[in-house]
Amino acid sequence: MKPNEIQTSDHHPKVSIGLPVYNGEKFIRKKLESLVMQTFKDFEIIISDNASTDSTSKICEEFVAKDNRIKYFRQEKTIEPILNYYYVLKKANCKYFVWTSVDDILYPEFLEKNLQILEKNEHFVCSISKIKLYGPMTEYIKSESSEKSFFSKIHKKIYQKIGYQSTFRISGNYMERIKQYIKNIRHNQVLYGLYRTEQIKKSFVKESFIGNDAAITFNLLKYGEIFVIDEILMEVYDGGMSRSGMIQVLKKMHHKIWD
């Protein structure tokens, strides 16, 4: 069955994939190609283009013409990133929902394997896999140049502390879940896990502030546990679109002060 034959007008897919994007022409084509290659096919892709000024819209429209699972929306003017995330969530009417960043890579079995976990375990509200990082900062840390100066060594130590982020399982009663999350809060990558749509909608926080993703997770933990598949099914780009950019900020500060 071809992708554009999967859905009919009265068909409701099982998974909504929310893709907020702004000026993502460097990544968007590869991103959409990877999404349509998922082994689990019964999904919709909801793109919210935050008034991009590059060729993002043109590339998205190419894919919309080929695959009716893809829904493209363009904001009239740029809105706060958190509201762009909320926009795609609000549009989702499927049983399950996942946000995905334009520069992150989902392996073909990401949806299938995480969906299996949620379908078989009602007490899990989110399932995600292990992750690994890719991108300029990862390559920089691996290179010999990261050993050449005092501040480069500091960058490396900080990156080893907060850069090699991981996902972690959270279980037990509500208070136990909260304690586990606080203990590991710097590793917060569960934002890009597969959720039960009803619960993540109840948990979302629209206000924009540092730590917003943590606030969402605190709310989510009221409804159940978070599961982690013991396998890498996602790669997270360390260059800034899907991460806080802390390492990049430190690196730029170093160059401004010492170069």
Image: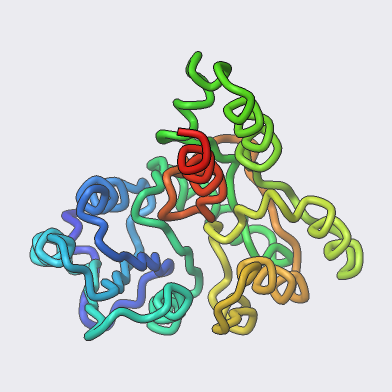
The image shows residue 257 at horizontal and vertical percentages of 52, 41
**Image quadrant occupied by the N terminus:** bottom left
In this orientation, which residue lies closer to the viewer: 256 or 192?
256
All told, the count of numbered labels is 0
Task: Judge from the rendering whether residue 237 lies leftward or rightward of residue 219; answer left or right.
Answer: left
Could one spot residue 50 in this view of the protein? yes
Task: Judge from the rendering whether residue 216 lies leftward or rightward of residue 243; answer left or right.
Answer: right
Which residue is farthest front? 258
Which residue is farthest top? 144
The image shows residue 122 at horizontal and vertical percentages of 69, 66
Relative to residue 200, is residue 67 depicted above or below? above
The image shows residue 55 at horizontal and vertical percentages of 12, 60
Could one spot residue 92 in this view of the protein? no
Q: Which quarter of the picture shows residue 239?
A: top left
**Image quadrant occupied by the C terminus:** top left
Task: Judge from the rendering whether residue 175 lies leftward or rightward of residue 125; answer left or right.
Answer: right
Name the residue located 62 percent from the left edge and 69 percent from the top edge. Answer: 210
In this orientation, which residue lies closer to the viewer: 50 or 259?
259
Q: Which quarter of the picture shows residue 218?
A: bottom right
Q: Which quarter of the picture shows residue 2?
A: bottom left
